[in-house]
Amino acid sequence: MIIDDTLLMKYMRGLCTDKEIDEISRWLEESDENRKAFRDAHFIFESILMTADPKILASPVIRKDRMRTGRVWKYTAAVMAAAAVLAITVFITGHYSFKAMSEEMLVVEVPAGKMMTFTLGDGTEISLNSGSRLVYPPVFYGRTRHVEIDGEARFNVAHNQEHPFVVNTFAADITVLGTEFNVHADREGNIFSTSLLEGKVQVSDASGSGKDYILTPDQTIILKEGDFIIENRLDSQALYWPEGLINIADTDFLSLMSRLETAFGVEIVVERSDIPEIDCTSGEIRVSEGLDNALRVLQHVAEFEYVKSPSAKKVYIR
């Protein structure tokens, strides 16, 4: 006996014979792959029940006072059962098409000096900072909505309690139901932080330690020397960059150089042993005004000189 989707759907509708039930039971015991196929089919069946018209899927009840018209009822029941099978077949085809589409990942990479904002199919709004890379499916399929980010992004997640939204990064996975938050995850620089503006998120260590952290609004979690630390403040840069700005207060010189590298697509080499100190309590740099303007602004609050390579792809801080 062949165990296929049609037979599994028949089983879930309670229409299998004892022999078919025994065959399915033996088939389930044969391998994990078979058990996974059964779970996938069951998920599809649940989706059908939630979305199909109950009038199509429900069989009519034949009452004793209607026995004289039994033939008509039996014919109607047969027609509706056939319609149910057709509906299930259509849904299976659709779901498997969605599953295939969900496995064809799309990649968005933002050029240096640019930003990008767009909306996913579920209504989630994402703003991507310069140099960021987002991997996402054309459609979401299954229990959770997964995307992957390398760089910096602002998420405004569409609420869907039944299908949590998960942002995968090199350091941690951020799980939300519906909220607004900022993620900065730079694998190459080993930088990770998440700032929560609204709602609630769970941050799970991606190393397999099993550690989870819950953030509430106006909190930031950062990765520092291999440990996650929660701070009761927002990362100031998370508030500035969506406006095309870089905050130069409350940050150190090397962190600012890293921001400039990402924003302008250059490599900045600090050729001095003493790191300049920034003497500034407020101020910002507008990215659209270019790298030279940014460095000249910084020279007003920190003592350093700089030289650009002939190709302008490298900047040397002296």
Image (cartoon, rainbow, N blue to C red):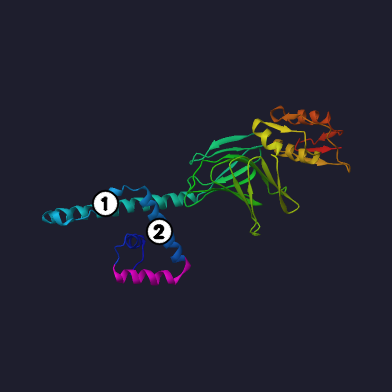
Task: Locate residue 254, reporting x and y percent.
Answer: 79, 41
Residue position marked by numbered label 2 in the rendering: 42
How many residues crowd mark 2 within 10 Å: few (<14), some (14–19), many (20+)? some
Number of on-image labels: 2
In the image, residue 122 lies in the stretch drawn in magenta = no
The amino acid at mark 1 is: Ala
Residue type beneath disc 2? His
Q: Which of marks 1 and 2 is nearer the N terminus?
A: 2
Q: Is residue 25 magenta?
A: yes
Could one spot residue 252 in this view of the protein?
yes
Return the residue at label 1: 83
Is disc 1 placed on a helix, strand or loop?
A: helix
Q: Is residue 123 left or right of residue 47?
A: right
Q: Which residue is depicted at the point 27% across and 48% down?
A: 55
In what quadrant of the picture does the C terminus appear? top right
- Quadrant of the drawing holding the N terminus: bottom left
Q: Where is residue 10 in the image (x, y as percent from the top left)?
A: 32, 61
193 left or right of 73 in image: right
When the figure is inspected, residue 229 is found, relative to residue 313, above or below; the finding is: below
What secondary structure predominates along the stretch shown in magenta?
Answer: helix
Task: Find the magenta span and give its range.
Answer: 17-32
Where's residue 270, x and y in %? Answer: 83, 41
Between residue 253 and residue 291, name the one nearer to us: 253
Badge 1: how crowded within 10 Å, few (<14), some, or many (20+)? some
Residue 251 x, y percent position in the rendering: 78, 38
